[in-house]
């Protein structure tokens, strides 16, 4: 038996075993947890949606099975509206920044730039305030009325909600062909 070959094989085994022990077994499994809900309600519970943004406001309500502008009772444009109530059943937060904040002014939340009120059929209301963009522009600071916590919501979600006021989902006339 060749002692030199046995020694080389033992050294290689020790190196590979050491690598596995130090690097591979020390790795932590990646967290696949979904982001928590900001709040969670059922689609069927939502009756009225109010959005105030930069001094402008829109209010929508469900009449029968149709969502309408509350002040005119005109139906909303379904192409633009179709997913809005589902988005308001409970957005997922990017993360909770702090459990308690004393001064919401730093985050654009006192007063908030946008206030969204979701009125439920049981007479309850969920009032959420959207503030400033985060420094990287990927999220907005948010809070729920009555909660001292500070959260981050996706900026794209906030943009969709704000456009309901800046670009309301009004039904436009169908173009007709002129003869």
Image (tube, grey):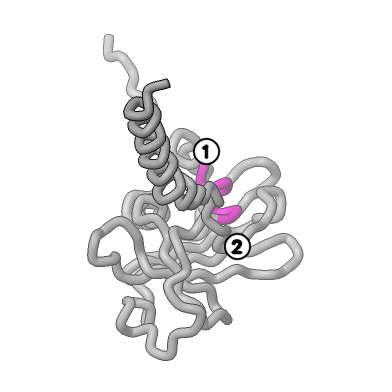
Residue 14 on image: x %, y %? 40, 41
Res. 134 image quadrant: bottom left
Dot 2 lies on which element?
Answer: loop
* Residue that label 1 marks: 82
Residue holding disc 2: 39
Kindly indicate whether the residue at mark 2 contacts the one at mark 1 (C-beta within 8 angstroms): no
Q: Earlier in the sequence, mark 1 or mark 2?
A: 2
Q: How far apart are the alpha carbons under marks 1 and 2?
A: 20 Å
User: How many residues crowd mark 2 within 10 Å: few (<14), some (14–19), many (20+)?
Assistant: some
Q: Farthest residue in the right direction? A: 122
Q: Which portion, as a residue range, is magenta? A: 83-90
Q: Looking at the picture, how far across and down is residue 75, in whole percent?
A: 53, 43
Instruction: Identify the element where label 1 is drawn.
Output: loop
Of the 4 image quadrants, the one containing the N terminus is top left
Q: Position of residue 86 (x, y in %)?
A: 57, 46
Pick the residue in front: 29 or 115. 29
């Amino acid at each position: 038996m060749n002692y030199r070959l046995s020694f080389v094989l033992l050294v290689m085994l020790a190196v590979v075993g050491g690598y596995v022990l130090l690097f591979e077994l020390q790795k932590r499994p990646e967290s696949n947890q979904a982001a928590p809900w900001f709040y969670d309600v059922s689609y069927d519970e939502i009756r009225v949606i109010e959005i105030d943004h930069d001094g402008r406001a829109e209010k929508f309500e469900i009449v029968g099975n149709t969502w309408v502008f509350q002040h005119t009772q005109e139906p909303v444009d379904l192409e633009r509206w179709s997913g809005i109530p589902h988005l308001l059943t409970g957005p997922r937060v990017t993360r909770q920044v702090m459990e308690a904040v004393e001064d919401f002014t730093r985050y654009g939340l006192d007063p908030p730039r946008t206030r969204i009120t979701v009125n439920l059929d049981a007479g309850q209301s969920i009032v959420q305030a959207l503030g400033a963009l985060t420094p990287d522009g990927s999220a907005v600071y948010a809070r729920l009325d009555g909660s001292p916590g500070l959260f981050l919501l996706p900026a794209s979600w906030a943009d969709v909600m704000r456009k309901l006021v800046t670009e309301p989902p009004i039904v436009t006339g169908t173009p007709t062909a002129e003869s």
